[in-house]
Image (spheres, rainbow, N blue to C red):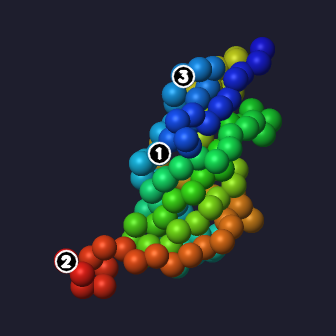
Amino acid sequence: MSVALRVLDDGAWVSVNDERRVSVGELWRVAGARDDGVCGCDCADFVVEGFTDVGVDGRTVAADVYGQCIRCGTAVNVDGIPVGRVVDGECRPLASGTVRFPRGGVAAPQRLPVPGSAGED
């Protein structure tokens, strides 16, 4: 049984079998962010700003995303973030909670100012 995966609405959604399943604007807690090179935080609060690609690795639905840690302002592109699993021809969400980015999946970290972090109003 095949599963259709697409990025819709200029990177705003991951679609599975023509149903919007994962959206931008979600806040993900990332364990080991410092160790994985995401940013300098032990546990980052990563807001997803867009999806650039989606695919399946075995039974795992994985997306390439870009966004930033709202704690420190580091912006990154990350490849292969697990967002679901294919079970019996359907995409099921992963257990909620803290995610772990794949090692080596982080590209081009950039430091961006976070409003209010440097005394701005």
Q: Secondary structure at mark 3?
A: strand
Q: Which mark is residue 19?
A: 3
Proximity of marks 3 and 1: CB atoms separated by less than 8 Å: no
Q: Residues within 10 Å of mark 3 (few under 14, many from 20)?
A: few
Hey, what amino acid is under mark 1?
Val
Q: What is the CA distance from the residue labelled 2 to the residue labelled 1?
A: 26 Å
Residue 50 falls left or right of residue 85:
left
Percent across and percent down for residue 107 are: 68, 67
Q: Which residue is mark 2?
A: 121
Which disc, if any, is residue 24? 1
The answer to which of marks 2 and 1 sits earlier in the sequence is 1
> Residue lying farthest left?
121
Taking the spot 70% from the left edge, 50% from the top edge, the residue there is 80
Element carrying mark 1: loop
29 is higher (above) or lower (below) than 112: above
Who's the residue at 55% across and 53% down the image?
99
Q: What kind of residue is marked 3?
A: Glu
Give coordinates of residue 106: x percent, y percent. 67, 65
Among numbered discs 3 and 1, the one appearing first in the sequence: 3
* Residue 75 locus on image (x, y percent): 53, 68
- How far apart marks 2 and 3 lie (CA) works out to 40 Å
Mark 2 and mark 3 residues within 8 Å of each other at the beta carbon: no
Residue occupying the point 27% across, 76% down: 116
Q: Quadrant of the C terminus?
A: bottom left
* Image quarter hosting the N terminus: top right
Q: Would residue 63 be visible to someone looking at this image?
A: yes
Q: Where residue 58 appears, x then y in whole percent?
A: 80, 36
